[in-house]
Image (cartoon, rainbow, N blue to C red):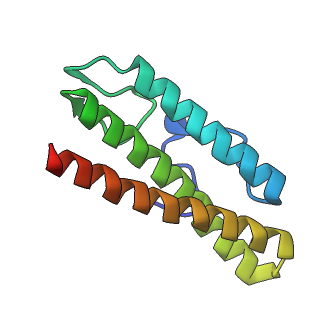
Amino acid sequence: MNHLFTDDNPETTLVGLGFKNVEKTLESIAKIEDYFDSLEQQQPLNAWTSNRTRPKEFIKNSIDCHKYYQKQKMYRILGLLNRAKVIYSKNGNPEIKESIVLLSEWMKQYKINKKLKINSFIVK
């Protein structure tokens, strides 16, 4: 069972992420982007994904690889966003509100990019 504030899979945890202010949120987004871009670069084709990700998936080609690691980024950002919303609802900190806006904007951009990439694959 997944819990918003527990660590059910410590081996897949990215340490040091946060959303207490805009600077920490930007640092966290960059850390997530860099981490999963690095894993994507290291991912061999026709192989299972790293033990540092869940769920495990068999990657056949570069398109599947890119989609998988983009989705991993999205799940991490979504986790931060949901945690930030809960904390903001309890204390109303305006700095956390700014972080929520930033994380929401990242999610919006992810959805736009996902649609564009899906459409480009359909055209080919």
The C terminus - image quarter = top left
**Count of numbered circles in the view:** 0
Residue 16 is situated, as x and y percent measured from the top left of the image, at 73, 41
Residue ID at (50%, 60%): 109
Residue 1 in sight in this render: no
- Residue at 36 percent across and 21 percent down: it is 43
- Residue 29 screen position, x and y as percent: 65, 47
Q: Position of residue 88 (x, y in %)?
A: 74, 77
Q: Is residue 76 above or below residue 69?
A: below
In the figure, residue 111 lies in which quadrant? bottom left
When the figure is inspected, residue 14 is found, relative to residue 115, above or below; the finding is above
Residue in view at x 25 percent, y 48 percent:
120
Give the residue drawn at x 59%, y 41%. Answer: 32
Classify residue 55 as left or right of residue 42: left
Q: In this picture, is 70 found above or below 37?
A: below
Q: Report the quarter where the N terminus lies.
A: bottom left
Q: Is residue 12 visible?
A: yes
Question: Which residue in the rendered view is the most extreme toward the front?
Answer: 123
Residue 33 relative to residue 57: left or right: right
Question: Camera-side residue: 1 or 63?
Answer: 63
